[in-house]
Image (cartoon, helix red, strand yellow):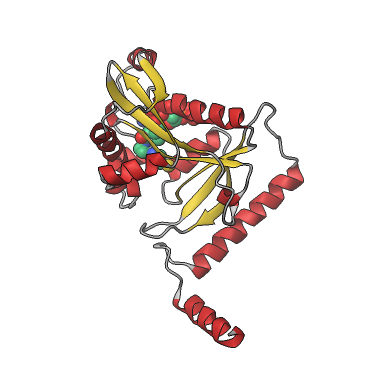
Amino acid sequence: MDSKADNGGKGTLCGSGSERTRVRDKVVVRRLTNSDSLRELTALIHDAYSELGRMNLHYLATTQDETTTRRRIDGGECWVAEAEGVLVGTILFHPPVRAGGGWYGRADVATFCQFAVAPSAQGAGIGTLLLETVERRATEMGVSELACDTATRAKHLVRMYRRRGYRCVACISWPNTNYYSIILSKSVGVRPRTQPAAARLLERVRFYCSMMTTMGVRRADGKARWWARVLKRLKSSVWE
Ligand SMILES: CC(C)(COP(=O)(O)OP(=O)(O)OC[C@H]1O[C@@H](n2cnc3c(N)ncnc32)[C@H](O)[C@@H]1OP(=O)(O)O)[C@@H](O)C(=O)NCCC(=O)NCCS
């Protein structure tokens, strides 16, 4: 990890506290429109995620091309932060998918991803504005949880989400990455739920079980471990 990563993985800050407040005051958060440039958006995403790339974390956002950006934003609501006509941040919100298993398949869980602020504008509160936007959208949609995932090794990000009230709920191994991810989720809504101590403990136990199962069965690149493949073959030959 380099010194920036030690410093919370952040890029260049916008100078003094008052300078940062001024940057935030100039920012407008709005939906992406057809007149916005996908090239500019993709370049912004690359710039922001480059720090994670230098930490050897292969997030899709470190290398995605414009076609991938288009495909990703077509599936959700893309929000951008603009300052004086320039895109300085973005976040992609998804309503519940209500399909598949696990935390992301739940009908009451909305998600977000592709969360990026230009390195020169980081630390000015723009990321917070974008997070507030998707948390508001989740509340408007009537879901009870808003979730995202990030690399277990990106400890500064896990800490940032936890400070904002996100809980570690599951572990997952995506294909085409080189890390395990933690799913973090926050109770949202008009009256966010406060969990009783027993429920918190149970959720923690579930999280560690999910971590052990995921890491036991899959490699960081999402592929099943050899013994899991053998077991699967055995199972199908016995049942078929
Ligand atoms: C994560 C990211 C979107 C946050 O955007 P931002 O505009 O810097 O966020 P903010 O200024 O609102 O600050 C958010 C948090 O980071 C902290 N932070 C800001 N600058 C920091 C720095 N230089 N060092 C350490 N922490 C810092 C803030 O204190 C704040 O924490 P808090 O909510 O507990 O107060 C931005 O840093 C980024 O694009 N990072 C690279 C891409 C990435 O990591 N995306 C998320 C993948 S899951």
The structure residue drawn at horizontal position 48% and vertical position 30%, both measured from the top left corner, is 131
Q: Is residue 217 above or below residue 155?
A: below
Asked which quadrant contains residue 37, the reply is top left
Q: Is residue 103 above or below residue 8?
A: below
Q: Position of residue 10 (x, y in %)?
A: 34, 35
Answer left or right for 4 relative to 145. Answer: left
Q: Position of residue 96 (x, y in %)?
A: 56, 43
Who's the residue at 44% across and 45% down the image? 155
Q: Quadrant of residue 50?
A: top left
Q: Of all residues shown, which one is farthest toward the front?
A: 34
| Whether residue 155 is situated above or below residue 15 in the rendered picture | below
| Ligand 1 quarter of the rendering | top left
What residue is at 37 percent from the left and 17 percent from the top?
27
Pick the residue in front: 50 or 148: 148
| Spot occupied by residue 44 in the image (x, y as percentages of width and height) | 28, 34
Whether residue 90 is visible here, answered yes or no, is yes
Does residue 2 appear in the picture of this structure? no
Q: Is residue 233 left or right of residue 30?
A: right
Residue ID at (45%, 78%):
226
In terms of depth relative to the viewer, which is nearer, 153 or 173? 173
Split into 4 quadrants, where in the image is the C terminus? bottom right
Q: How many marks?
A: 0
Camera-side residue of 110 and 33: 33
